Image (cartoon, rainbow, N blue to C red):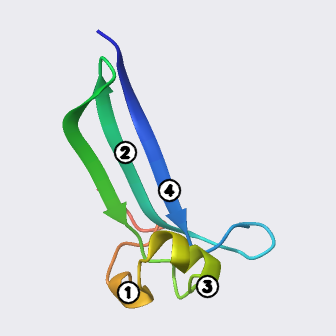
Amino acid sequence: MTRYLAIDTETTGSSPIKGGHLVTELASIEFLNDKPSGIVFNLKLNPEGKKSTGRAFRVHCIPHDELIDKLRLADDME
């Protein structure tokens, strides 16, 4: 049996160094023998006031208002 995860992230922009952009969403799907197993992980994160660039928003379509009450990456995730 072959098992692997496909992982995806969404961010506020394309450059963590130049633009200080942050992760807004982490997601993964488990595959067994090249077929989705049905196990999906999705977590939206608060980008600590950093708003998405227009280009990033057109890709992920996650409005800033939807992220305000989410965990920050720096928060304790226990």
Secondary structure, mark 4, is strand
Q: Which residue is mark 1?
A: 68
Q: Quadrant of the N terminus?
A: top left
Residue at the far left in the pictured view:
38
In the figure, 64 relative to 2: above or below?
A: below
- CA separation, marks 1 and 3? 18 Å
In the figure, 27 relative to 19: above or below?
A: above
* Amino acid at the residue labelled 3: Gly
Q: Earlier in the sequence, mark 2 or mark 4?
A: 4
Q: Which residue is mark 4?
A: 9
Q: Is residue 63 visible?
A: yes
* Amino acid at the residue labelled 4: Thr
* Amino acid at the residue labelled 2: Ser
Q: Nearer the viewer, residue 71 or 35?
A: 35
- CA separation, marks 1 and 2? 22 Å
Residue at the far right in the pictured view:
18
- CA separation, marks 2 and 3? 25 Å
Q: Quadrant of the C terminus?
A: bottom left
Secondary structure, mark 1, is loop
Q: Earlier in the sequence, mark 1 or mark 2?
A: 2
Marking on residue 54: 3
Q: Earlier in the sequence, mark 1 or mark 3?
A: 3
Q: Which residue is mark 2?
A: 28
In the figure, 15 relative to 46: above or below?
A: above
Q: Badge 2: how crowded within 10 Å, few (<14), some, or many (20+)?
A: some
Query: Mark 2 or 3, which is nearer the eye?
Result: 3
Q: Are marks 2 and 3 in contact (CB under 8 Å)?
A: no
Question: Is 44 on the left or on the right of 48, as rendered?
Answer: left
Could you tell me residue 5's position as x and y percent? 39, 33
- CA separation, marks 2 and 4? 9 Å
Q: Earlier in the sequence, mark 4 or mark 3?
A: 4
